[in-house]
Image (tube, rainbow, N blue to C red):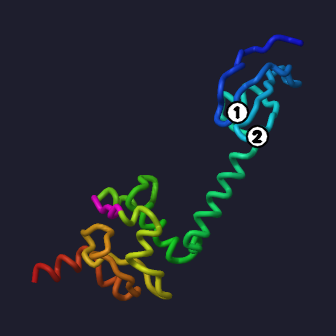
Amino acid sequence: MPMPKMNLVGQQFGRLTVLDFAGSDKKQQSLFRCVCGCGNEMVTSGRSLKSKQTQSCGCLRVDQGKQVGLQSKLHGLIGTPTYRTWQSMKRRCLSENERGYRWYGAKGVSICDQWMTFEGFLKDMGERPEGKTLDRINPFGNYEKNNCRWADNQTQKANTRKRYLEAVCQ
């Protein structure tokens, strides 16, 4: 049996622990026999282990899928208008790559700690009524219970920063 290009025996990669060298594949990449934390054994390339492409026998993906399913079952609202509204709010305030970030996060608009989880947001705001969107009462304020409401389009359009300043200054 040819010698491995790298010696990974005894090292751990994710849930996998390398047991021994298992030969080479057609591309002359070193293959290693591993044992997964769940007890299954498998053979994979050293390159795949080092690049973190392979971190388990497949059980990690199953467990992550179960976790997503569990989160979905907790509130059962993933994909609903309320959930999408919560996600959009977070993107506007937290993601510099989001188109609207310059009007929210870049201007200092933040989200209260409780609303960082969907369950906290849902507890304070309830489900989004049809035809309504999330509106900040004070458009300069943050996303928090005392500054937000579900509003129709007409209310939203009337509640701009410019109009808010005009009303406050009169």
Residue 41, percent across and down?
A: 81, 34
Q: Is residue 132 above or below residue 53?
A: below
Q: Residues within 10 Å of mark 2 (few under 14, many from 20)?
A: many
Is 33 situated above or below 76?
above
Taking the magenta stretch, the answer to whether it contains residue 104 is no
Mainly helix, strand or loop, the magenta region?
Answer: loop
Q: Could you tell me residue 117's position as x and y percent?
A: 44, 63
Residue 57, disc: 2
| Magenta-span inclusion, residue 112 | yes
Q: Position of residue 129 (x, y in %)?
A: 47, 86
Q: Quadrant of residue 159?
A: bottom left
What is the span of residues highlighted in magenta in the rendered image? 108-113
Q: Are marks 2 and 1 in contact (CB under 8 Å)?
A: yes
Mark toward the start of the polypeptide (2 vs 1): 1
- Residue 30 disc label: none
How many marks overall? 2
Residue 126 position by quadrant: bottom left
Instruction: Give the residue drawn at x 47%, y 81%.
Output: 127
Q: Residue at x 65, y 31 (%)?
A: 13
Q: Looking at the picture, how far across and down is residue 36, in whole percent?
A: 73, 36
Residue in front for this viewpoint, 17 or 110:
17
**Dot 1 amino acid type:** Leu
Local SS, label 1: strand
Residue at 42% across / 67% down in the picture?
Answer: 89
Q: Which amino acid does label 2 sit on?
A: Cys
As drawn, the label of residue 16 is 1
Q: In which quarter of the image is the C terminus?
A: bottom left
Q: SS class of the residue under badge 2?
A: loop
